Amino acid sequence: MRKYLIIGAALLLAPSVNFAQEYLPDAARIQSVVNYLASNKLKGRGTDEKGGIKAGKFVEKQFKKLGLAAGGDQGNYYQDFKFDKNAHKDIPSRNVLGFLDNHAAKTIIIGAHYDHLGRAALFDGKYPIGEIHNGADDNASGIAGLLELARYYTKNNEQEPFNFLFIAFGGEELGLQGSKYFVNHPAIALDKVHFMLNMDMIGRYNPSRGVGIGGYGTAAQWPEIFKNVSSDTIKFFTDKAGKGGSDHHSFYMKNVPVIFLHTGGHDDYHKPTDDADKLMAKEEAGILDIGIQIINGAMKFDSLTFMETE
């Protein structure tokens, strides 16, 4: 934590505490981000649709506000790429990258995908074409989490022993395209990545289920780290798997330890009804607090030992 000078006087204590509290995960900020990204204005943030391009620009703007350096190609925040999907060829998309340079040997990657189904034109009739799929939980919630963690580590902490690379992935809904491209064209060498934390659908907390934390088996040190992870408000359980249907999978396949935060499926999954008014922002803030505990615990180790999982 960033240290603030307190010279004994009680009057100086309260402002320092309040200043620090400002950068903890905040439900109001989370809700505000999701309200914008999952609004009809962005029309579902479809890959190669205007709403998806606007969403990427929004993330870039937030990275700039937070003081993150451009982590993309040619000194900008974008990593552009194209991919094929079934009959659709040369579909353009982009990752958005913000870098916190702590002049460290290794880097922690924190990611979430910003795309959703849009109006479903690229899904070959699998979803109702023409209807807006706003994707509040999937994955505006993850982008809100990404920005909260970026704020926390840029504003609330002293210089950490690791760099941070924050990535908003494009093309995830069409086959993890953004993360696949990144690991094959990495902005930093993958052997210099401490671990990757991925957030996908963290906005619909079910207290009877709890939040699932995948990747528990991908590093020998995770069990030791998790001994100190706790919450009075959020129930969680761990899953050893490194593989899965979200962007952490791409990193696991390159022998990078991963952590995956996910609140589980629901009836609005990939439907036009996944709207912002159903977000559980207060609970998401609690989930992000757990994420911070995991990250801080992992920074106590100079390196993590990758392990394959069954």
Image: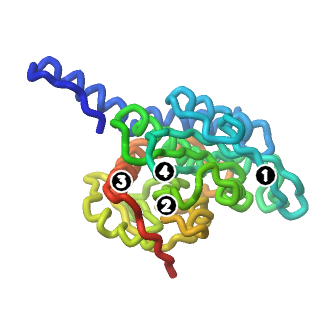
Q: In what quadrant of the picture does the N terminus appear?
A: top left
Which is nearer the N-term, disc 2 or disc 3? Answer: 2
Horizontal relation, residue 267 to residue 209: left or right? right
Q: Which residue is mark 4?
A: 107
Horizontal relation, residue 208 to residue 86: left or right? left
Amino acid at dot 4? Thr
The answer for how far apart the CA atoms under marks 1 and 4 are is 35 Å
Nearer to me, 308 or 117:
308
The numbered disc on residue 219 is none
Q: Please say if the residues under marks 3 and 4 sit with CB atoms less than 8 Å apart.
A: no
**Crowding at mark 3 (Cα within 10 Å: few <14, some 14-19, many 20+):** some
Q: Residue at x 39, y 44 (%)?
A: 285
Q: Secondary structure at mark 3?
A: loop
Frontmost of labels 2 and 4 is 4
The answer for how far apart the CA atoms under marks 2 and 4 are is 17 Å
- When the figure is inspected, residue 150 is found, relative to residue 303, above or below; the finding is above
The answer for how far apart the CA atoms under marks 2 and 1 are is 26 Å
Q: Residue at x 30, y 31 (%)?
A: 20
Q: Which residue is mark 1?
A: 120
**Crowding at mark 4 (Cα within 10 Å: few <14, some 14-19, many 20+):** many
Q: Position of residue 80 (x, y in %)?
A: 75, 45
Which is nearer the N-term, disc 3 or disc 1? Answer: 1
Image quarter of residue 34: top right
Q: Secondary structure at mark 1?
A: loop
Q: Which residue is mark 3?
A: 299
The answer for how far apart the CA atoms under marks 3 and 1 are is 40 Å
Q: Position of residue 174 (x, y in %)?
A: 74, 58
Q: Which residue is mark 2?
A: 260
- When the figure is inspected, residue 244 is found, relative to residue 107, above or below; the finding is below
